[in-house]
Image (spheres, rainbow, N blue to C red):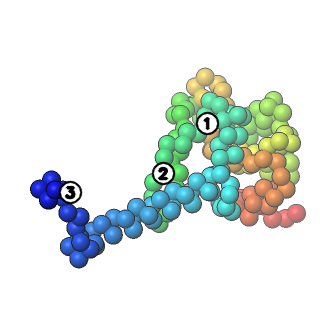
Amino acid sequence: MDGSRSKRISQKGKCRETQVDGLLEKAEAFARGVLESLEALTGTTACKGVQITRLKAQQKLFPDCSYVLMGFSMNREGKVCALLAQQYILFGREATEDEIHDELLKLGFHPEMDGEYYTNGEYDIFDAVPNNVLVGIDGSLYFIDTIIYKSDEANLSVYKSQSPKYTKNE
């Protein structure tokens, strides 16, 4: 190597360790949070968050208001979370419970536990209530914020443990 064209790598004592190390620590923490969020989305860890299977179910059952994964961000508590988007629905009003019930029956679902949730044997839909189902200006129903799980007794237990509205008188 010729001394006039090569650059000398800074020695450890001459580096700005605090800025670089601090930036690397932040990047590592953010990357760890993204990984944890991805694990939560794919269902590889127990979590209350959204799972990929639920996003796919929303897209399959209600394609007009499916979610799109936009990226990741930090919430107020400093936790990394998924950023989801849905198409904006031009709506006239919230659907009534009877309209929701009738639409789910048309889609092959039937009510369980006095309408606490609906199932078709493949998927269970929870939280199908008026403020989560809109009547679009075209007259169609849009299920924008329901909770969808693959049919499984364990998912019912998860829902029961998370739902503030779940009636605990079995």
Callout 3 secondary element: loop
Q: Earlier in the sequence, mark 2 or mark 3?
A: 3
Q: Is residue 72 above or below residue 106?
A: below
Type of the residue with mark 1: Ser
Give residue 108's quadrant in the image.
top right
Residue 156 drawn at (x, y percent): 80, 56
Q: Circle 3 is placed at which residue position?
A: 1
Type of the residue with mark 3: Met
Residue at 62% in and 57% down: 40
Q: Circle 2 is placed at which residue position?
A: 72
Residue at 62% in and 30% down: 64
Looking at the picture, tell me which residue is in the foreground, 145 or 17.
Answer: 17
Type of the residue with mark 2: Phe
Looking at the picture, tell me which residue is in the foreground, 19 or 85.
Answer: 19
Q: Nearer the viewer, mark 2 or mark 3?
A: 3
Q: Tell which residue pokes out farthest to the left in this image.
A: 4
Callout 2 secondary element: strand
165 left or right, relative to 170: left
* Label 1 Cα crowd, 10 Å radius (few <14 / some 14-19 / many 20+): many
Q: Are marks 2 and 3 in contact (CB under 8 Å)?
A: no
Q: CA distance from mark 1 to mark 2?
A: 18 Å
Residue 7 drawn at (x, y percent): 19, 58
Q: Earlier in the sequence, mark 3 or mark 1?
A: 3
* Label 3 Cα crowd, 10 Å radius (few <14 / some 14-19 / many 20+): few
* Label 2 Cα crowd, 10 Å radius (few <14 / some 14-19 / many 20+): some
Instruction: Quadrant for the C terminus, please.
Output: bottom right
Residue 142 drawn at (x, y percent): 64, 34
23 left or right, relative to 78: left
Q: Circle 1 is placed at which residue position?
A: 66
Q: CA distance from mark 2 to mark 3?
A: 45 Å
Give residue 129's quadrant in the image.
top right
